[in-house]
Amino acid sequence: MAARLNIEAAQMPVARVGLPLPVIFYLLAVVFPVVFNLGPIVMTLVRIVLLIMVLPMLVGLFMGRFGKLIPTDGLFLLHLIWMVVALAVTTPAQVITQSGSVGVEFIGGYLMGRCYIRDRASFLALCRWLVLLVLLSLPFALHETITGHPLIVETIRSIPGLTSVGVVYAVPRMGLERVQLVFAHPIHYGLFCSVVFSMCFVALKDVFSASRRVISSFIIMLCGFLALSSGALLAVVLQIALITWATLFARVRWRWWLLVGLFVLAYVVIDILSTRSPIRVFMSYATFSAHNAYWRGIIFEWGVKNIFGDAAENIPAAVWFGIGLNDWVRPVYMYSGSMDNFWLVTAIRYGMPGLILLSLGMILVIFHVMRRNFEGDPALINIQRAWVFTMLGLSFTLSTVYVWSNIFSFVFFIFGTGVWLMTTSPLKEAEEAATLHSGDTADPKALASPYTRFGKRNRSDAPHPA
């Protein structure tokens, strides 16, 4: 009876609690790429929203209004500080504009998710909004893939006093124009859709009907496909593979360790049997053409040289502070300085400390959430898996693309939306829900028994992979 009360009570607020207003403004700013000049400063709607909100969110975070501080909060702030230091050393003339714009997009996006998505109700409301945004984008995406004209971007650019992201003239693939929709590059639209896939198919399992969930997920996949980005497509494939693995081995508690072991085994076998490195083999399957795979292999090789140095190529090491916004050393035949790897660019631009602070902050949260045990609450398990699958797919995509502007901020917003999973539990949400609906304070002892076999220990604190 108590277990049934727990789950039912924890689900009640979902129907009553909508998405927090700051998050609504933020999402609308992400998908409406309005750009204008404020004196010498280039402004976007995302930057305006975050400039208004970032200080109150920081103050509220340190005052404990959004839960206890976690190590990632400090690591991300240190990453921001190191960014300023590194740019001051390497490109001092641009330190203010670069660290100011990128800094507010980074820390503001993270705090928006960290501070306002704090329970299952707000998380599921976010999922519904994201699904709706992608579904509404389908007509515009279909028009663009046929005509090559991004309607929303071109409409904004036609308004006097405003501009928008540039119109990308990418080479068509499979006879179709690549869809950028409202983002700076088609890759970014594909990434946006890949983020929403697990949010729809997994997190909304107990919210949408089966048919609605399947149809919506299929449309999301179609929209992502129209970006014709290999990184985004493979991110969706990876999520589908993880969903399938979780379903097939649902009764095996150590299924995720088995999967990790298989990946390690595959890496070792490829390293032994192939004449190419495992990274180059991976790149050959993670692109639409052998030419792109070869090009990315060269970019990675020379990117590493720019970080750790290469005496033969007369490249100095830049391990600590990176090279900032300076051009990176590459072969003379590489006319373009673009680099399709967010992690690599971070290390080159801000040095290894910048990369370590950022990646460590993300790994700590993802690993902790993966180990949480929400046994007895299927809805919370679905949310946990959806966020973990999304972050794994996103981390993979970021190794094949570079992100900037609105989508850069959105990446860390999505990451921040999962922080609450580190501390929540079925018992905790049941108490809050019971208080909300009855007006009385729930007795923790009365609800504790279904979730523990050993005194007062809460089983949600026991390690258990997603």
Image (tube, rainbow, N blue to C red):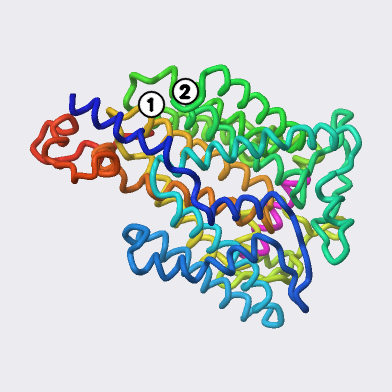
Q: Is residue 138 left or right of residue 308?
A: right
Quarter in which the N terminus is drawn: top left
Q: Which residue occupies 54% across, 53% down? A: 23
Residue 268, image x, y percentages: 52, 34
**Magenta region, residue range:** 295-308
Residue 337, image x, y percentages: 79, 59
Quarter in which the C terminus is drawn: top left
Quadrant housing residue 272: top right
Extreme front residue here? 439
Q: Which residue occupies 58% across, 42% down? A: 396
- Do we see residue 462 in this rendering? no
Q: Are marks 2 and 1 in contact (CB under 8 Å)?
A: yes
The Cα atoms of the two marked residues, 2 and 1, are separated by 8 Å
Q: Which residue occupies 71% across, 70% down? A: 325
Secondary structure that dominates the magenta span: helix
Q: Which mark is on residue 255?
A: 1
356 vs 288: above or below: below
- Do we see residue 160 in this rendering? yes
Residue 234, image x, y percentages: 64, 33
Observer-nearest of 257 and 443: 443
Magenta stretch encompasses residue 302: yes
Q: Is residue 334 left or right of residue 55?
A: right
User: Label 2 neighbourhood size at 10 Å, few (<14), some (14-19), many (20+)?
Assistant: some
Observer-nearest of 304 and 131: 131
Quadrant housing residue 430: top left
Query: Mark 2: which amino acid?
Result: Trp
Magenta stretch encompasses residue 420: no
User: Mark 1 falls on what kind of element?
Assistant: helix
Q: For mark 2, what is the residue?
A: 245
